């Protein structure tokens, strides 16, 4: 949105960037869990060691995740914190306690709002935005390769990279809407997060949801057209097998329900938008469940066939990451502005100057019109 100069992004960009960082932190925990021996996580790092030729296996998808998540986290953190610096300086200037002012002084790197500071800030933001855009595409593509490079029916497909990218944007906007609509109500931000902002996000949800739906249908067509009995059975099992409820829940939440946003009154309805954002988040969880569980619960060997049910450990880990994400966002809302104040002030100043200029022009034309009417009479 920054590269495309979309001004409405200023109502959501700060919180969206924060959610990205917190979500990446939660995602980074899962490769650690999947190693089994979590105390050996440093084995994944290609650092100089004394173990001889023991190095990470760079052909392993686990290593792809390590580099993708770490790179994504680093660039996202820089982009988020760069935009946060002017706002931290504003909080510093308003702080009443000396210790609080000192902490925000350090956090804002001594920002004074000079022309040189703003010039470097805008240049760095543009560079980081230029880096982040292809990085988002590459990271989700690499994550999709975890599945696409395998030979498991249901995973071995070339549509996964664009499908995962569109799904990430789709679910990301839904999550932003879920949390920002709550923040809008609790923090009284109705004047800054307007119905126009909500409608713009809903339009993106319609587009990306349609792309995801197209990917679902393409998967079904490819499984039929390929002639592979294993691919055909994998997708037939998704729709008609023991986990039919997850597949049709995914299709309903991710493909059918977003199409309601074609109706303009629904796009501008806050309560309906919040409900739909929660529905989409549930649908994206169904999608992950369908991709992983239904593709491997019936493998090539019938002896491996079983009905998977999560244990209390898996449920606890999943709920724990949700709790970590929400706790991190609440702490962020407590110590930092959830809206980009400096950029919003700039927009308000421009719109205020434009209104003043329009009002001045209107008043200047009134005497001329009055004198013209007197002359005519």
Image: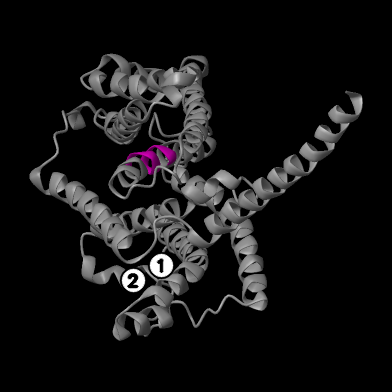
Quickly name the residue at label 2.
Answer: 43
Front position in the image: 322 or 265: 265
Q: Is residue 135 left or right of residue 81?
A: right
Front position in the image: 317 or 193: 193
Q: Which residues lie in the magenta part?
A: 173-178
Dots 2, 1 in contact, CB < 8 A: yes
Indicate how the structure is coloured in the image: one colour
Q: Is residue 278 above or below residue 112?
A: above
Instruction: Judge whether residue 78 is colored magenta.
Output: no
Q: Quadrant for residue 363, please give it.
A: top right
Quickly name the residue at label 1.
Answer: 56
Circle nearer the N terminus (2, 1): 2
Residue placed at 45% from the left, 22% from the top?
261
Where is residue 293? Give x, y as percent: 27, 33
Residue placed at 78% from the left, 44% from the top?
364
Instruction: Judge whether residue 175 is colored magenta.
Output: yes
């Amino acid at each position: 949105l920054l590269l495309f100069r979309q001004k409405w992004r200023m109502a959501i960009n700060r919180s969206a960037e924060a959610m990205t960082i917190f979500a990446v932190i939660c995602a980074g925990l899962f490769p650690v869990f999947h190693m089994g021996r979590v105390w050996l996580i440093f084995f994944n790092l290609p650092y100089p060691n004394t173990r001889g030729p023991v190095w990470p296996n760079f052909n392993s998808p686990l290593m792809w995740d390590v580099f993708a998540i770490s790179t994504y986290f680093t660039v996202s953190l820089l982009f988020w914190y760069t935009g946060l610096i002017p706002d931290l300086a504003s909080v510093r200037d308003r702080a009443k306690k000396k210790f609080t002012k000192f902490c925000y002084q350090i956090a804002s790197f001594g920002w004074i709002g000079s022309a040189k500071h703003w010039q470097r800030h805008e240049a760095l933001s543009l560079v980081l935005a230029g880096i982040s855009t292809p990085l988002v595409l590459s990271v989700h593509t690499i994550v999709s390769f975890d599945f696409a490079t395998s030979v498991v029916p249901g995973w071995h497909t070339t549509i996964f990279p664009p499908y995962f990218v569109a799904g990430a944007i789709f679910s990301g906007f839904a999550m932003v809407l879920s949390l920002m609509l709550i923040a809008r109500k609790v923090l009284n931000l109705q004047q800054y997060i307007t119905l126009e902002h909500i409608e713009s996000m809903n339009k993106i949800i319609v587009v990306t949801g349609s792309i995801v739906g197209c990917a679902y249908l393409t998967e079904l067509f490819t499984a039929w057209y390929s002639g592979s009995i294993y691919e055909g059975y994998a997708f037939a099992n998704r729709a008609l097998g023991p986990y039919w409820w997850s597949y049709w829940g995914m299709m309903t939440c991710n493909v059918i329900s977003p199409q309601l946003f074609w109706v303009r009154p629904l796009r501008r309805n806050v309560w309906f938008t919040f409900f739909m954002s929660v529905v989409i988040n549930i649908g994206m969880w169904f999608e992950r469940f369908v991709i992983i569980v239904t593709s491997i619960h019936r493998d090539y060997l019938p002896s491996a066939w079983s009905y998977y049910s999560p244990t209390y450990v898996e449920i606890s880990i999943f709920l724990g990451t949700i709790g970590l994400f929400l706790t991190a966002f609440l702490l962020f809302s407590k110590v930092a502005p959830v809206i980009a104040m400096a950029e919003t002030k700039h927009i308000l100043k421009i719109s205020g100057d434009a209104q003043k200029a329009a009002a001045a022009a209107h008043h200047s034309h009134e005497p001329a019109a009055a004198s013209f009417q007197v002359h005519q009479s």
